[in-house]
Amino acid sequence: MKNESKYWSKQELKIYILLLCAKADSIESDVEINMIKSKIDIATFDRLYDEFCCDDEDNCLDKIQSAIAQHEYSNKEIKGLRKEIHEIFLSDKKFDLKERNLDRLLDSMLY
C-alpha cells in the first residue's frame, strides 16, 4: 500500500472525495466529472484526477482519512461537503448499494 503522507487543502480533499463518489457505482459519468470540474481550476483537477486514477479504493480511503485528520471542519463545512457528495451520488437519479455504503463510510470519517 502506497499511502503518501501529503498535505491537501480542504478544496483538494473535497475534489478527491467527490471523485471517489463519482466512481462508487463503477461508472464515472460525464455529468459527474463536469460537476466536479466546475468546483476547481482545471490544472488542480487534472493533477488530482491523475493521482486518483492510480489509486485503488482502499488507498483512496486511506488518503482521505489521513487528509481529514489534518483539517478541522465546522458543522457547516461538513454539511456543505455532505450536500455536494449527495449531489454527485444522485446525479444519475439512483442511489445504489455501493454509493450508500461509501456514504456511510465517509460519514463516519467526517464525524
Image (cartoon, rainbow, N blue to C red):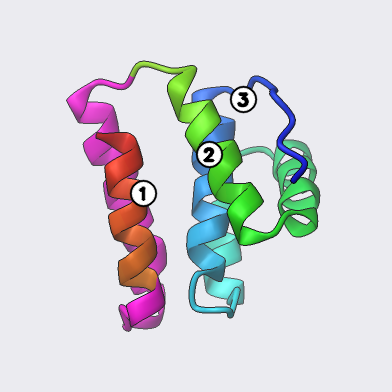
* Along the line of sight, the residue nearer the viewer: 3 or 9: 3
Q: Residues within 10 Å of mark 3 (few under 14, many from 20)?
A: some
Residues at marks 2 and 1 touching, judged by CB atoms closer than 8 Å: yes
Residue to which mark 2 is pinned: 64
Which image quadrant for residue 20? bottom right
Give the amino acid type for the residue marked by disc 1 in the picture: Leu
Residue 5 position in % (x across, y down): 69, 24
Compute the Cα span from label 2 to label 1: 9 Å
Which image quadrant for residue 40? top right
Residue 78 position in % (x across, y down): 27, 34
Q: Earlier in the sequence, mark 2 or mark 3?
A: 3
Q: Residues within 10 Å of mark 1 (few under 14, many from 20)?
A: some
Residue to which mark 1 is pinned: 106
Q: Residue at x 79, y 41 (%)?
A: 47
Residue 39 position in % (x across, y down): 53, 44
Residue 28 falls inside the magenta stretch: no
Q: Earlier in the sequence, mark 2 or mark 1?
A: 2
Q: Residues within 10 Å of mark 2 (few under 14, many from 20)?
A: many
The local secondary structure at tag 3 comes to loop
Choose mark 2 or mark 3, whichever is in front. Answer: 2
Q: Quadrant of the C terminus?
A: top left
User: Magenta residues?
Assistant: 73-98
**Res 52 label:** none
Q: Earlier in the sequence, mark 1 or mark 3?
A: 3
